Image: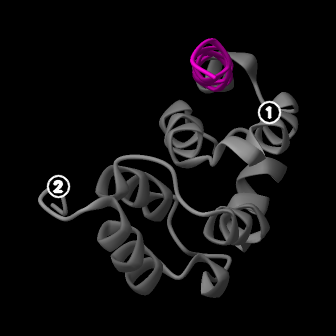
Amino acid sequence: MLADYPADMRQLWIEYIFRPGRWAADTSPWAMRAMAQWLGGQTTENVFGDILRSKPWQALRGDSGRFEADIADSMAVMCPSSMRSTLRAELAGLDPAKSSNAILFLDLMDSLETANA
């Protein structure tokens, strides 16, 4: 939807539209999936920190039965490189069947960045 916008403009739209710091406990996990889809890449540390502190994310972590693999995958896509270890720790307590692809993606991104540094 925002593909024609430059990355910095997409970031501003995401911050304005989604506002994860204001999410209520009953905010749908759809919001995380939609953010990743619209953004198409990493978000800022501030926005990602807001997502990790959000009530919906905390609720999903507390009830791993509600947690779906595509949410973990979406989080991995949006995760800034500086916060990958934090997200890995967050995902470690979840069902590996639902989080393993996201962790693999984080590891792959780390490997690519290290190889190209």
Q: Is residue 81 visible?
A: yes
**Image quadrant in which the N terminus is located:** bottom left
As helix, strand or loop, the secondary structure at mark 1 comes to: helix
Q: Main secondary structure of the magenta part?
A: helix
Q: Position of residue 76 (x, y in %)?
A: 58, 38
Q: Residue at x 84, y 44 (%)?
A: 86
Name the amino acid, label 1.
Arg
Give the residue type at disc 2: Ala
> Which range of residues does the magenta coloring cover?
103-117
Which of the 4 image quadrants contains residue 24? bottom right
Q: Foreground: 117 or 112?
A: 117
Give the alpha-carbon distance from disc 1 to disc 2, as whole Å.
28 Å
Q: Quadrant of the C terminus?
A: top right
Residue 105 within the magenta-colored segment of the rendering? yes
**How dense is the environment of label 1, judged by Cα within 10 Å: few (below 14), some, or many (20 and up)?**
some
Looking at this view, name the residue that lies furthest to the front. Answer: 117
At numbered mark 2, what does the secondary structure look like: helix, strand or loop? Answer: loop
Q: Position of residue 53 (x, y in %)?
A: 78, 69
* In contact (CB < 8 Å): disc 1 and disc 2: no
Residue in the picture at 61% in, 46% down: 79
Asked if residue 61 is positioned above or below residue 109 in the image, the reply reads: below
What x and y, as percent, mark residue 12? 39, 78
Seen as rendered, the residue at the extreme left is 4
For the residue pair 116 and 38, the one nearer the viewer reads as 116
For disc 1, the marked residue is 88
Is 77 magenta? The answer is no
- Drawn side of residue 115 relative to residue 54, left or right: left
Q: Which residue is mark 2?
A: 3
Q: Please give left or right for residue 30 compared with residue 22 in the image.
A: left
Tell which circle, 1 or 2, labels the residue nearer the N-terminal end.
Answer: 2
